[in-house]
Image (tube, rainbow, N blue to C red):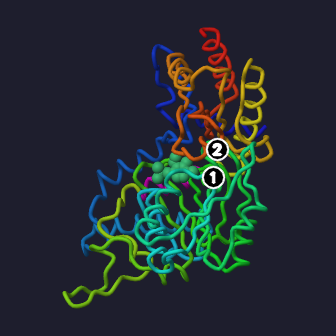
């Protein structure tokens, strides 16, 4: 029932009408890597470049004030989207990667020293591993890793055991970009807080698919990327509780993040600007706000219901294929990402041949090499869904996989 109003939105996405290798319409199932953009987002950005463009926060002139208004209104849209307490808690970054690096670097500098520990998990994206390893190099901190079960769920008993007097922060993904696992982040936060340890949630794969309320989750930091939620590339968000953002140092130095500068002593701007050195991508923030408006107008509950339905249907249909193996948990804990392997067909061959049939899926290690190692594989094929995908596209995928299998 819920699928109808969403499917009708396909017309908002011109790229979905593209013919690829003579195949029409394009079956785009690489949404976990990036989503397509609706006209509303692209047009809002074009409109800003054509009619409003001027640098923000600095000018007394008309256009600068207009651009600033748009930029700050976008921050308010993000605040509402996450239900943060204040716009001071919304920092614009280039994306999830930069948001995580910011926390690792600044929190690390303020609160961690040699021997202190960060808890991550075995299913993290490289951005939530390597950022901390840079701190390992710089400060001598240690990474502690929550293991996963064979079906790709966190072993919560082991998580609890990792806490000790050296634990300074937990940094864990909300949803796995490989397995689709939806992690119990509320429990993760509650347990960490019982040890007075703050939590960073990597929301790259949760923000597009489910309602996120940072106050309800109780997390201290939450990171997401605009391009994975129908917004432009190059823009993302770090939510941080004011009490933490106030206590950690700036990330980069430059214009905007300062109050006064002299060669003897520089003071820093108020939140959130303390973390926003240089000219922000104020056109992208408009695009991001438009994308969030777009998602809100459909409703994240409706999007989630549609994608859950599609994922359940896809898991059931895929299992009809001979030799099919699907990674990750059962449908109850499975978000709109399905990693699979068919017999001994190499994932690269499968992805390349599906592409020739007009079906775009992801192949490889999905920036999660430690997870691949845990699963004993080099890579997978991954299909991931967005609000515009349909059951017919799932059928096309299954048919495509069958055709590829027959070639081997
Ligand atoms: N974390 C997860 C779980 C992701 O899926 C991704 C993107 N694949 C990232 C972090 C990094 O996001 P970005 O490249 O937009 O910074």
Q: Is residue 146 above or below residue 177?
A: below
In the picture as drawn, the residue positioned furthest to the left comes out as 263
The residue shown at (54%, 61%) is 223
> Which portion, as a residue range, is magenta?
285-296
In the structure shown, which secondary structural element does the residue marked by tag 1 occupy? loop
Q: Is residue 202 left or right of residue 215?
A: left
Of 212 and 153, which appears nearest the observer?
A: 153
Task: Name the mark on residue 122.
Answer: 1
| Residue under numbered circle 2 | 374
Q: How many angstroms separate mark 2 from mark 1 (CA)?
A: 8 Å
Say whether mark 1 is within 8 Å of ligand 1. no
Q: Is residue 173 left or right of residue 273?
A: right
- Quarter placement of the N terminus: top right
In the structure shown, which secondary structural element does the residue marked by tag 2 occupy? helix
Q: Is residue 286 left or right of residue 179?
A: left
Q: Residues within 10 Å of mark 2 (few under 14, many from 20)?
A: some
Is residue 229 visible in this depiction of the protein? no
Q: Are marks 2 and 1 in contact (CB under 8 Å)?
A: yes
Of 121 and 230, which appears nearest the observer?
A: 121
Residue 206, given in percent of the width and then of the height, sits at 63, 53
Q: Is residue 382 above or below residue 236?
A: above
Count of marks overlaid on the render: 2
The residue shown at (55%, 68%) is 79
């Amino acid at each position: 029932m819920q699928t109808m109003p969403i499917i009708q939105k396909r017309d908002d996405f011109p790229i979905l009408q593209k013919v690829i290798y003579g195949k029409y319409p394009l079956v785009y199932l690489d949404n976990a890597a990036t989503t397509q953009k609706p006209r509303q987002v692209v047009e809002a950005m074009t409109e800003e470049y054509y009619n409003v463009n001027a640098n923000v926060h600095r000018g007394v002139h008309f256009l600068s004030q207009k651009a600033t208004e748009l930029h700050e209104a976008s921050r308010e849209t993000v605040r509402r989207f996450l239900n943060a307490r204040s716009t001071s808690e919304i920092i614009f970054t280039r994306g999830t990667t930069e948001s995580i690096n910011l926390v690792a670097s600044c929190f690390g500098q303020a609160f961690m020293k040699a021997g202190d520990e960060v808890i991550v998990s075995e299913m993290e994206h490289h951005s939530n591993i390597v950022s901390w390893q840079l701190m390992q190099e710089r400060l001598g901190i240690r990474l502690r890793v929550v293991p996963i079960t064979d079906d790709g769920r966190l072993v919560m008993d082991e998580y609890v055991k990792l806490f000790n007097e050296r634990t300074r922060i937990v940094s864990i993904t909300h949803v796995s970009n490989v397995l689709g696992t939806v992690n119990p982040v509320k429990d993760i936060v509650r347990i960490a807080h019982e040890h007075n340890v703050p939590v960073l949630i990597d929301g790259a794969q949760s923000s597009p698919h489910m309602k996120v309320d940072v106050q309800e989750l109780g997390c201290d930091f939450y990171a997401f990327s605009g391009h994975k939620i129908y917004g432009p590339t190059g823009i993302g968000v770090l939510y941080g509780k004011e009490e933490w953002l106030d206590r950690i140092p700036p990330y980069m130095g430059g214009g905007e993040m300062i109050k006064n500068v002299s060669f003897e002593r520089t003071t820093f701007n108020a939140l959130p600007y303390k973390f926003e050195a240089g000219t922000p991508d104020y056109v992208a923030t408009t695009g991001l706000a438009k994308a969030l408006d777009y998602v809100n107008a459909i409703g994240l509950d409706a999007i989630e219901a549609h994608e859950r339905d599609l994922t359940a249907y896809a898991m059931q249909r895929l299992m009809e294929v001979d030799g099919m193996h699907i990674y990750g948990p059962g449908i109850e804990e499975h978000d709109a990402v399905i990693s699979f392997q068919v017999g001994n067909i190499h994932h690269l061959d499968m992805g390349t041949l599906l592409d020739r049939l007009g079906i775009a899926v992801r192949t490889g290690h999905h920036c999660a090499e430690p997870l691949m190692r845990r699963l004993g594989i080099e890579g997978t094929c991954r299909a991931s869904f967005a609000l515009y995908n349909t059951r017919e596209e799932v059928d096309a995928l299954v048919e495509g996989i069958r055709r590829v299998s027959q070639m081997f």
